[in-house]
């Protein structure tokens, strides 16, 4: 006993060098074991929350199990969809607002009144997935140039009479962002009510210095998350990727374009910026207003139910369309299911344009099956990006798609940022979501289903024009790329659930 006591005293007064010999091995072993125990404690969370995405589940289990400390840290930042703690309030916001807007039903079109059978089928699906319904009496212009989009938004805001609502994923505090901000400030000083909702991660460059003049002018500014907790502030999930402008409840804009110099082709890193946006009048503007009002209530708690925000908009045009909002607060995976259904309905041709192509396995299977059925499937994808990992991950899908007969083109005329889909030249979609898991499963997105053949024809014409600035990928040449390239692509693909 004395010997044991003496040894303890010696250790206290003459502590061993923990970083040499056996003590170093014991210390590092204990540290490694602690790391495994801490990260493995996250596995129940993964298994409970990834039921619908087994590939994602397996990927995160391997990362957590094989990479102590870092694996758990990556999961906490990238892997957790924190919508669970926000779902109740977000869904309640939608229900409260929708309950006060029953008058929008006067603009709805009965599905059976839609002339084309395939469009009727898609309308039935959209009605099951969304709270909105197809509406008639719209005037919708498809804008393929970002300079025109910004000019139209600026003109509409400048002519506003009582309200301007804006919601953006990215708003840069550069020359373009400052100029439009100043137009908003001018209108606010004239007495208009201006509300500005931005995503706290996408628009992280917005500083208090940039926003203060807006607040001083009377503009109400709010951020769509992050929440109050430290973990939520570091989460890149649960983002509002929406781009919405609604002026006086009469004219609305949505599509792929954010606000910043790069979107006008002023950034030499990207060059020419190819995007697609919609300018709308009619009942679809009221549906877009509804999406903004729900998001605003979720972010601020303020109910925007003034009659002037939802004016009568009869006879604005002759187009049938429907605004569809999607987000992780909906268990139906609205936009994912809509795209899956649309692809499976195709009989003749599919044209898909997207800036980020990291699809889920069901969507890959749908595209491959459509091609095998004899449908002409054409994809126009980005040849360059600010995030090279997404390009590499996208290319990892090319082999099987090409083998099934899918035509793949990469845009080389600049930065491709459009998000459009057309089916058989009759049904089409334009909006904010990319064709990837992040947009379709983790982000809040919005888009417009266009039920008119004329709209699909315009988008197909734009597709053909864009192909003049694209290169086609052929299976034979693709198979001959270096093994290092294949390795890089497949490595990036492992992270496809969170790219």
Image (cartoon, rainbow, N blue to C red):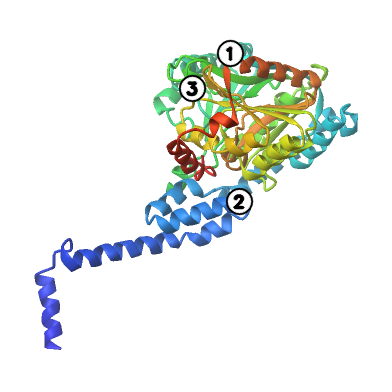
As measured in the structure, the alpha-carbon distance from the residue carrying label 3 to the one carrying label 1 is 16 Å
What number is the disc on residue 214?
Answer: 3
Q: Is residue 210 left or right of residue 263?
A: left
Closer mark to the observer between disc 1 and disc 2: 2
| Residue 319 percent across, percent down from the top left | 80, 20
Q: Secondary structure at mark 2?
A: loop
Q: Quadrant of residue 173?
A: top left
Res 454 visible = yes
Position of residue 387 relative to residue 279, above or below, is: below
| Residue 160 percent across, percent down from the top left | 64, 14
| Residue 72 percent across, percent down from the top left | 42, 54
| Residue 382 percent across, percent down from the top left | 55, 26
Q: Which residue is mark 1?
A: 154
| Residue at x 10% of width, y 75% of height | 10
What number is the disc on residue 53?
Answer: 2
As measured in the structure, the alpha-carbon distance from the residue carrying label 1 to the one carrying label 2 is 42 Å
Q: Is residue 276 left or right of residue 222?
A: right
| Residue at x 87% of width, y 27% of height | 116
| Residue at x 46% of width, y 31% of height | 387
**Count of marks overlaid on the render:** 3
Position of residue 395 relative to residue 40, above or below, is: above
Closer mark to the observer between disc 3 and disc 2: 2
Q: Secondary structure at mark 3?
A: helix
Q: Which badge, 3 or 2, comes first in the chain's sequence?
A: 2
Q: Secondary structure at mark 1?
A: helix
Residue sticking out furthest to the bottom? 1
């Amino acid at each position: 006993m004395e010997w044991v006591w003496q040894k303890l005293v010696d250790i206290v007064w003459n502590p061993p060098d923990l970083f040499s010999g056996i003590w170093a091995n014991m210390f590092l072993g204990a540290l490694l074991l602690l790391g495994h125990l801490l990260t493995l404690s996250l596995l129940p969370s993964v298994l409970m929350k990834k039921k619908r995405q087994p590939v994602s589940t397996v990927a995160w289990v391997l990362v957590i199990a094989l990479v102590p400390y870092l694996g758990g840290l990556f999961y906490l930042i990238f892997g957790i969809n924190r919508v669970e703690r926000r779902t109740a309030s977000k869904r309640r916001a939608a229900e409260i607002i929708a309950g006060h807007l029953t008058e929008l039903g006067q603009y709805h079109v009965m599905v059976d009144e839609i002339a084309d059978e395939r469009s009727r089928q898609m309308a039935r699906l959209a009605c099951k997935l969304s709270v909105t319904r197809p509406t008639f009496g719209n005037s919708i212009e498809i804008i393929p140039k970002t300079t025109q989009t910004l000019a139209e938004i600026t003109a509409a805001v400048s002519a506003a009479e009582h309200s301007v609502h804006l919601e953006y994923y990215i708003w840069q505090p550069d020359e373009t962002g400052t100029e439009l901000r100043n137009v908003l400030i001018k209108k606010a000083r004239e007495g208009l009510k201006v509300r500005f909702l931005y995503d706290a991660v996408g628009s992280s460059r917005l500083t208090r210095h940039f926003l203060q003049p807006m607040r001083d002018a009377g503009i109400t500014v709010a951020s769509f998350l992050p929440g109050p907790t430290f973990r939520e502030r570091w989460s890149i999930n649960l983002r509002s990727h929406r781009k919405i402008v609604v002026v006086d409840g009469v004219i609305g804009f949505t599509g792929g374009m954010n606000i910043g110099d790069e979107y006008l082709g002023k950034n030499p890193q990207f060059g020419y910026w190819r995007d697609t946006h919609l300018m709308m009048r009619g009942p679809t503007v009221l549906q877009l207003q509804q999406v903004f009002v729900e998001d605003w209530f979720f972010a601020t708690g303020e109910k925007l139910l003034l009659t002037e925000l939802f004016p009568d908009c009869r006879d604005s045009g002759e187009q049938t369309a429907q605004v569809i909002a999607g987000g992780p607060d909906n268990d139906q995976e609205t936009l994912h299911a809509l795209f899956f259904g649309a692809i499976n309905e195709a009989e003749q041709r599919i044209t898909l344009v997207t800036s980020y192509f990291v699809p889920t396995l069901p969507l890959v299977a749908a595209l491959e099956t459509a091609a095998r059925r004899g449908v002409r499937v054409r994809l126009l994808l980005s040849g360059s990006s600010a995030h090279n990992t997404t390009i590499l991950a996208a290319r990892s899908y090319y082999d099987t798609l090409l083998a099934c007969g899918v035509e793949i083109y990469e845009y080389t005329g600049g930065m491709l940022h459009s998000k459009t889909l057309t089916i058989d030249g009759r049904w089409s979609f334009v909006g904010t979501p990319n064709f990837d898991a992040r947009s379709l499963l983790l982000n809040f997105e919005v888009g417009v289903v266009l039920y008119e053949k004329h709209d699909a024809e315009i988008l197909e014409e734009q597709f053909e024009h864009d192909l003049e600035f694209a290169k086609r990928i052929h299976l034979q040449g693709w198979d001959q790329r270096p093994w290092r390239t294949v390795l890089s692509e497949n490595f990036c693909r492992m992270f496809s659930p969170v790219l």
